[in-house]
Image (tube, helix red, strand yellow):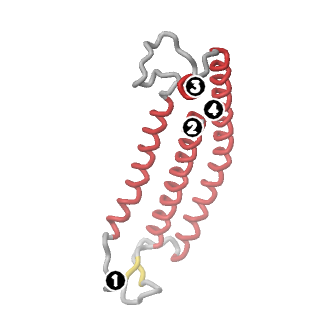
């Protein structure tokens, strides 16, 4: 059965962004869970071993010297701050790249038929009508920007989770 589709074109246009949002929400949830584990020793906690108040280093390594635990907490904080600083600097460059390429995508795809707003006969199948060039340009540009923003958010959350977890 050639030509059978599982989802309509509109269904795929809706499903793909929903999957991206679900992935980002899941990453945020995981980041929240990991960030609740405290590296430093907190004497005020009641020793709750089933909650988020347990001491990660003492439980994993059996370290009883609180200066070692404090030093590890300081190192983790410095790594986290350095990673965040790196990401913000990197994303300034990525932002410029995203804007330039979004404009290029819009201009090149929109100018194919002179930014037309009327449907054209498809070049690959003369029996079908294709969407207007302006629609294709806008849809492709928005898709590129959403993909880039999703990638930036995923990279940021991945770095935060990695620095907390490590």
Can you tell which of label 3 and label 2 is closer to the viewer? 3
Give residue 76's quadrant in the image. top right
Label 2 to label 4: alpha-carbon separation: 7 Å
Q: Could you tell me which secondary element the residue under label 2 belongs to? A: helix
Q: Does 88 appear above or below 48? A: below
Q: Which residue bears the numbered disc 2?
A: 160
Q: Could you tell me which secondary element the residue under label 1 belongs to? A: loop
What x and y, as percent, mark residue 40? 57, 20
Q: Which residue bears the numbered disc 4?
A: 80
Q: Could you tell me which secondary element the residue under label 4 belongs to? A: helix
Are the residues at dot 2 and dot 4 in contact (C-beta closer than 8 Å)? yes
Question: Which residue is rendered at x = 68% and y = 39% of the image?
Answer: 86
Mark 3 or mark 1, earlier in chain: 1
Label 4 to label 3: alpha-carbon separation: 17 Å
Q: Which residue bears the numbered disc 3?
A: 57
What x and y, as percent, mark residue 155? 57, 46
Specify the quadrant that holds the N terminus.
Answer: bottom left
Give residue 97's quadrant in the image. bottom right
Mark 3 or mark 2, earlier in chain: 3
Can you tell which of label 3 and label 1 is closer to the viewer? 3
Label 3 to label 1: alpha-carbon separation: 58 Å
Q: Residues within 10 Å of mark 4 (few under 14, many from 20)?
A: some
Q: Which residue bears the numbered disc 1?
A: 3
What x and y, as percent, mark residue 27? 46, 43
Q: Residue furthest top?
A: 44
Horizontally, residue 82 falls left or right of residue 4, namely right
């Amino acid at each position: 059965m050639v030509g059978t589709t599982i989802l309509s074109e509109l269904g795929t246009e809706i499903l793909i962004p929903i999957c991206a949002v679900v992935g980002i929400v899941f990453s945020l949830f995981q980041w929240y869970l990991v960030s609740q584990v405290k590296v430093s020793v907190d004497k005020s906690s009641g020793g709750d071993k089933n909650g988020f108040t347990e001491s990660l280093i003492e439980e994993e390594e059996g370290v009883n010297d609180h200066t070692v635990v404090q030093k590890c907490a300081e190192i983790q904080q410095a790594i986290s701050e350095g990673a965040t600083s790196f990401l913000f600097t990197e994303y300034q460059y990525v932002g410029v790249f995203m804007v330039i390429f979004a404009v290029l995508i819009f201009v090149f795809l929109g100018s194919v038929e002179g930014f037309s707003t009327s449907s054209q006969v498809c070049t690959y199948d003369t029996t079908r009508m294709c969407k207007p060039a302006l629609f294709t340009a806008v849809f492709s540009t928005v898709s590129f920007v959403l993909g880039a923003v999703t990638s930036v958010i995923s990279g940021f959350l991945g770095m935060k989770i990695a620095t907390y977890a490590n």
